[in-house]
Image (tube, rainbow, N blue to C red):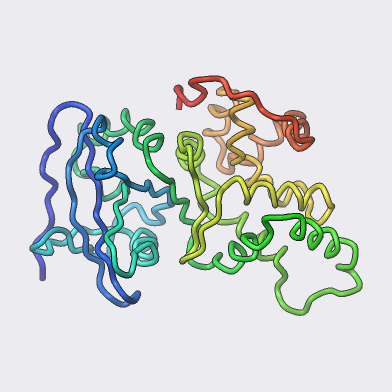
Amino acid sequence: MAASYKHDPLPEGRFIRLLHLHPARNLKTPLRCSVTTVALEEIGSPAYKYEALSYVWGSPVGDRSLAVGADGKSLLITQNCETAMKYLRLRKETRTLWIDSICIDQQCINEKNHQLSLMGDIYRQAWKTLIWLGPEHEKVLREMQRMQNGTGKLCILLWTLFRKRFAPKKPSMLERFRALCNSPWFTRVWTLQELLLSPNPYAVSRSALLPWGQLLEIAKDYIIYGAIDHGDILSVLAFDRDYHVKYPDLAVFEEAARCEEFCKPLVESCSECISDYLLNRKPQTPEGNTAAL
């Protein structure tokens, strides 16, 4: 059995760790990675280009082994983290990521508190934020990738008009989209904060990659054309980044954090604002809207 991996202490100041995920040709290959330390001020260079992962841990305690470093010492991670990493691996190249459960020493309270204070910069400076929604949503994300133009809107409209007459026997894209909306990622307060801090977020499932803005536009098209009830996708609307830029109501965030299912009260309390946004009025972007998160 491999020895346990121990994080080297970070230098004082604005330093973080980056994870270098080694390539693999198939999912069965065990995960291997290395970890380096870098100053946040150095991250602008191509050598330190990284993607931040936003995901739900699932279990608070890891039970899967990750081989770290040349000697392959073992670090325990959760099953959801392991699954995400296996699908995010490239076939021939190393992929550089920031993953909180690995890049932060979870056994050191002082380090955790200090890294929390840097979280805004970590997500803002990431090349992309990869929002891992689980491996089961690949098909619906690929369907949405094909709906980038007016043809996609037409498909939604036609499906709405004829859905009663031509009810599909197999699960429809609409049903798959509803399942996507029920992903655990949409039920956490901190994932909303990570999204708001991210300038370039993408929804990810297996190898499917979809710009977050495109997912939101399709959600709004479903509502506008009557294909889906507003209440069915409250969680997705609550994660409309531009909506929160326009209406940065921190009191609502504080109230939402006390709710078991925060998305519903968050959106219901601002339904008038959401209706305004759905009418395609362009949001104004005040500077520093995420400073308090």
In the image, residue 51 sits, relative to residue 120, either above or below, namely below
Tell how many labels: 0
Front-most of 54 and 152?
152
Screen quadrant of the C terminus = top left
In the image, residue 41 sits, relative to residue 260, either above or below, namely above
In the image, residue 51 sits, relative to residue 207, either above or below, namely above
Front-most of 84 and 46?
46
Q: Is residue 287 left or right of residue 231?
A: left
* Residue at (79% x, 76% y) in the render: 168
In the image as oriented, which residue stretches furthest toward the top? Answer: 287
Where is residue 283? Give x, y as percent: 66, 28
Front-most of 71 and 178?
71
* Residue at (59% x, 62% y) in the render: 141
Q: Is residue 34 left or right of residue 23?
A: left
Screen quadrant of the N terminus = bottom left
When asked about the image quadrant of residue 125, the answer is top left
When asked about the image quadrant of residue 164, the answer is bottom right
In the image, residue 154 sits, relative to residue 277, either above or below, namely below
Where is residue 271? Give x, y as percent: 74, 33
Q: Is residue 92 left or right of residue 223?
A: left
* Residue at (8% x, 63% y) in the render: 71
Q: Is residue 270 left or right of residue 167?
A: left
